[in-house]
């Protein structure tokens, strides 16, 4: 096998230059696009604004001791959710704690700085790997390292900062493979694997597969004896197993967290048209659903030239070219796509493994350049292949008007730089040679930086047109946070940030303890319980929303609720400068007692389900009639199609003065109580993606005749019993009864809840939190047992002798993962000790044999 002896100083210089080029190019792209923090356009698209920035804000609160909860339980979201799975999925990167260095109201800037730092680190890691794979110029390694870090996958997915850990992991895991081949650095290798899998297990899995393929190619090219090859492969596998074992405390928790999560939407793999793959090799293209394979024109030309570069050994050319082609084909075949994504079809883009192919393209380009710049025949062949690529891409809708000038500049810069570089190695004095080489390097680096910056700017603009976006932290969030801080009374009662959300994780962003929660790990029991009570959701059930309803406020001890004006960034309406208002309610404590619990199953009516959990009748649910704009009843109560699009209505009778609610989960549009002063209320339903929440419409008139005017924006349905008339006096009586028999005091600390109960409490104690897996409770001095469930909430039976309640939470998988982690650590230490002893024995010289003693000859007397 080819051994490299590149000095460490050369590797460090190349890594530093690669990081600088990548960081400058990424920031320059955002500057061109006028994106935050360089302009007025927001970067917070899709899950960046909805999930990742709020979660980093919660991490900031944890690090500064200001969060409600800890690593085990997040008491701010979903009325109490398991936090360690979220931490292991979104926040376990070693870069994430850097948010603590920024002010709380600059959390968007903190996440952006971490993003740039991760991209720069990926460039540095790839530059270091390239020089370890084969000696070469450090500027060339830096150029291709930056090409990898600024690949199309990065430019399309940099709003997923946790995925960028996989971008860093791929070259690092390839380095681990190199150490395994050489039989050295086992402990650093295991630690790198553990760090990669802890930082983001999802992309680490893909990076591990990619590094394994690189290792196989390296073994095939070295062609060692079979025993040595098996030993090297065994060392690599052992390193990965031990590293994953060290990461098991997080991995096991995340895995079991996904097992208990709401299933969300079912997805199927659909390969994109074949011509879309070459199109995504070009700069300045964007498409959410196709593989982003851009690596820069210089790297692409070098990779295309590799099969024709005669200075490169034939086996090297064949091996790396074959690997690139096989991985490219694997993107389009359903079984291999499933294998790349850990055997679960992703909800979203089906090409999240594209960064691995980008890395392989860059490695192929490095082998073409490190043997010397390709000659004219090889460059001509590469140019012909690039021309065919452009011709195929031009037939797709992925190539835009701005693609062509960026591509032309990239081709001109790449060819000019490569030809100057080759000429500098031919005839000419030392001065001329040096000047041409410097000029070539400057041209290549400049072309790479400009092309990547332009591609980043284009991707940013097109992404904003295709995905939802959210405003960064501003005056609206500041006012919300201030209102919540003034009203906060946790754990005596909850303060809900309100139905008028800014992002799906408002409680994490602005504080409070609400129902809203959006995560890939949103528990099944939370979504189903809130849905049964009339709650709405988005993201296929994993983005549950706050429910503006006094009955559920009583059930979940919401004593203060914030009401904000609609978010102008979402509605595109003029900004309302009015400060948020807070409504307060006298509610029972977090722990209440049901003397005669009703264990009947939830039904189809959210009003009856609320009453079942409350233990009192507080609604009148009248018969309804749904009519079209011509006054005739609509068949099946379907609205939003045909002549019923403009003016359907719902008629019912409610007692005068009762609060009128509409529960129409499959209706999308607006509803307004005829004759009322309230404005139209929006409902959002999208089949499989969003469910509309129950909404208050106003008070029933003195006549009792209620008409609700609907303006649908898509076909939907109004179910029987959609209207509920809430008797607020009855609700106040029920709340007072629950408060009188509830806990006299409640204390909450991370994963522990303690409550003091009135003497003689019988029936069932109910903790107003979803009964997610991991809760154990003890009543009085009794043993702790798995908590029971009362209509989705934590429940503990009482026999009248207990006066205290103690519930503790342990995330499923934590004990198992810790045991596996400790076993892996012990195994690593024992293996390291055994290796050290064996090497010491081999290095100790054998003792020399002392000379035999000389016989003494005694003369005869």
Image (spheres, grey):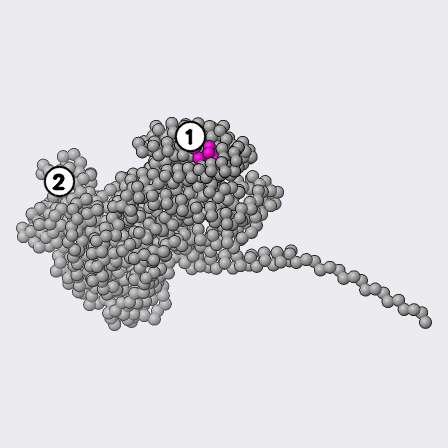
Image spot of residue 335 (x, y percent): 43, 38
In the picture, which quadrant includes the N terminus?
Answer: top right
Question: What residue lies at 64% left-to-right and 56% top-to-bottom?
Answer: 843
- Say if 780 sits above or below 93 in the image: below
In depth, the one of 407 and 499 nearer the eye is 407
Q: Where is residue 54 in the image (x, y as percent from the top left)?
A: 29, 53
Label 1: which secondary element: helix
At 37% across and 45% down in the image, what residue appears?
24
Give the quadrant of the C terminus. bottom right
Q: To which quarter of the image does residue 451 belong? A: top left
The CA distance from mark 1 to mark 2 is 58 Å
Report the magenta residues as a range: 415-422
Q: Is any part of residue 667 visible from this angle?
A: no
What residue would you read off at disc 1? 386
* 433 displayed left or right of 397: right
The foreground one among 456 and 139 is 139
* 836 is within the stretch colored magenta: no
Q: Residue furthest right?
A: 861
Q: Count neighbours of disc 1 (C-alpha within 10 A) and say few if under 14, some if 14 to 19, many if 20 or more.
A: many
Q: Could you tell me if residue 143 is visible in this image? A: yes
* Residue 58 image label: none
Left or right, 287 with reference to 380:
left
Q: Quadrant of residue 740?
A: bottom left
Q: Tell me the residue at 30%/54% (across/down).
A: 107
Instruction: State the residue in front, 563 or 360.
Output: 360
Q: In this view, does 846 lie above or below 286?
A: below
Along the polypeptide, which appears first: circle 1 or circle 2?
1
Q: Which of 156 and 126 is in front in this view?
A: 126
Dots 1, 2 in contact, CB < 8 A: no
Marker disc for residue 648:
2
Rendering coords of residue 314 (x, y %) = 55, 33
């Amino acid at each position: 096998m080819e051994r490299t002896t590149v000095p460490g100083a050369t590797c460090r210089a190349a890594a530093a230059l690669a990081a600088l080029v990548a960081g400058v190019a990424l920031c320059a792209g955002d500057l061109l696009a006028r994106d935050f923090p360089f302009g007025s356009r927001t970067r917070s698209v899709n899950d960046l604004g909805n999930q990742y920035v709020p979660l980093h804000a919660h991490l900031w609160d944890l690090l500064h001791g200001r969060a409600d909860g800890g690593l085990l339980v997040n008491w701010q979201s979903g009325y109490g959710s398991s936090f360690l799975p979220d931490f292991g999925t979104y926040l376990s990167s070693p870069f994430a704690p850097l948010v603590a260095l920024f002010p709380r109201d600059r959390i968007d800037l903190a996440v952006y700085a971490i993003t740039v730092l991760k991209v720069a680190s990926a460039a540095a890691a790839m530059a270091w790997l390239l020089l370890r794979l084969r000696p070469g110029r450090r500027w060339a390694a830096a150029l291709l390292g930056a090409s990898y870090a600024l690949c199309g996958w990065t430019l399309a997915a940099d709003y997923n900062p946790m995925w960028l850990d996989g971008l860093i992991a791929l070259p690092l895991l390839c380095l681990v493979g190199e150490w395994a081949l050489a039989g050295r650095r086992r402990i650093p290798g295991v630690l790198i694997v553990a760090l990669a899998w802890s930082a983001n297990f999802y992309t680490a899995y893909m990076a591990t597969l990619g590094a394994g393929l690189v290792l196989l190619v390296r073994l095939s090219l070295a062609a060692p004896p079979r025993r040595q090859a098996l030993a090297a492969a065994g060392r690599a596998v052992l390193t990965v197993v031990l590293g994953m074992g060290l990461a098991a405390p997080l991995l096991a928790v995340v895995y079991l967290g996904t097992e208990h999560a709401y299933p969300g939407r079912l997805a199927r793999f659909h390969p994109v048209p074949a011509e879309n793959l070459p199109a995504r090799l070009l700069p300045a293209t964007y498409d959410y659903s196709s593989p982003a394979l851009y690596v820069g024109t210089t790297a692409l030309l070098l990779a295309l030239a590799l099969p024709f570069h005669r200075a490169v050994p034939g086996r090297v050319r064949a091996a790396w070219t074959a690997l690139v082609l096989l991985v490219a084909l694997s993107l389009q075949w359903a079984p291999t796509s499933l294998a790349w994504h850990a055997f679960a079809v992703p909800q979203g883009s089906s090409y999240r493994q594209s960064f691995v192919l980008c890395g392989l393209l860059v490695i192929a380009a490095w082998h073409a350049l490190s043997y010397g710049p390709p000659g004219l025949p090889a460059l001509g062949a590469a140019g012909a292949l690039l021309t065919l690529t452009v011709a195929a891409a031009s037939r797709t809708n992925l190539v835009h008007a701005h693609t062509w000038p960026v591509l032309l500049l990239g081709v001109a810069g790449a060819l000019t730089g490569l030809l100057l570089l080759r000429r500098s190695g031919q005839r000419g004095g030392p001065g001329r040679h040096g000047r041409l080489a410097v000029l070539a390097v400057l041209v290549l680096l400049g072309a790479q930086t400009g092309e990547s910056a332009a591609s980043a700017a284009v991707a940013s603009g097109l992404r904003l047109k295709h995905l939802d976006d959210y405003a960064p932290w501003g005056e609206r969030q500041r006012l919300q946070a201030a209102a919540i801080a003034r009203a906060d009374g946790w754990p005596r009662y909850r303060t809900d940030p309100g139905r008028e959300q800014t992002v799906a994780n408002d409680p994490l962003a602005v504080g409070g303890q609400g129902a809203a929660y959006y995560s890939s790990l949103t528990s099944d029991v939370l979504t189903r319980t809130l849905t049964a009570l009339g709650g709405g959701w988005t993201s296929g059930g994993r983005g549950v929303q706050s429910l503006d309803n006094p009955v559920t406020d009583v059930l979940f001890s919401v004593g203060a609720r914030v009401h904000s004006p609609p978010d102008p960034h979402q509605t595109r309406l003029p900004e309302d400068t009015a400060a948020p208002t807070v409504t307060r309610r006298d509610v029972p404590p977090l722990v209440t007692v049901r003397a005669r619990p009703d264990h009947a199953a939830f039904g189809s009516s959210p009003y009856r389900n609320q009453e079942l959990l409350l233990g009192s009748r507080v609604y009148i649910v009248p018969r309804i009639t749904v009519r079209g704009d011509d006054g005739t009843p609509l068949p099946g109560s379907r609205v939003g199609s045909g002549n019923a699009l403009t003016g359907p209505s719902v008629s019912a009778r409610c007692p005068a003065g009762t609060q009128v609610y509409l529960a129409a989960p499959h209706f999308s549009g607006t509803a307004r109580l005829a004759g009322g002063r309230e404005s139209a209320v929006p409902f959002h339903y999208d089949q499989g993606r969003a469910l509309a929440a129950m909404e208050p419409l106003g008070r029933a008139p003195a006549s009792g005749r209620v008409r609700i005017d609907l303006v649908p924006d898509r076909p939907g349905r109004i179910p029987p019993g959609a209207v509920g008339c809430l008797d607020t006096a009855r609700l106040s009586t029920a709340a007072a009864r629950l408060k009188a028999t509830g806990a006299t005091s409640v204390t909450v600390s991370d994963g522990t809840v303690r409550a003091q109960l009135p003497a003689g409490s019988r029936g069932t104690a109910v903790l107003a939190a979803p009964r997610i897996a991991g809760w154990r409770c003890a009543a009085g001095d009794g043993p702790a047992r798995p908590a029971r469930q009362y209509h989705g909430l934590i429940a503990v039976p009482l026999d009248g002798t207990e006066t205290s309640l103690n519930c503790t939470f342990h995330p499923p998988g934590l004990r198992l993962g810790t045991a596996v982690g400790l076993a892996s650590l012990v195994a690593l230490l024992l293996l390291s000790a055994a290796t050290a002893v064996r090497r010491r024995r081999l290095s100790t010289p054998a003792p020399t044999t002392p000379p035999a003693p000389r016989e003494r000859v005694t003369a005869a007397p």
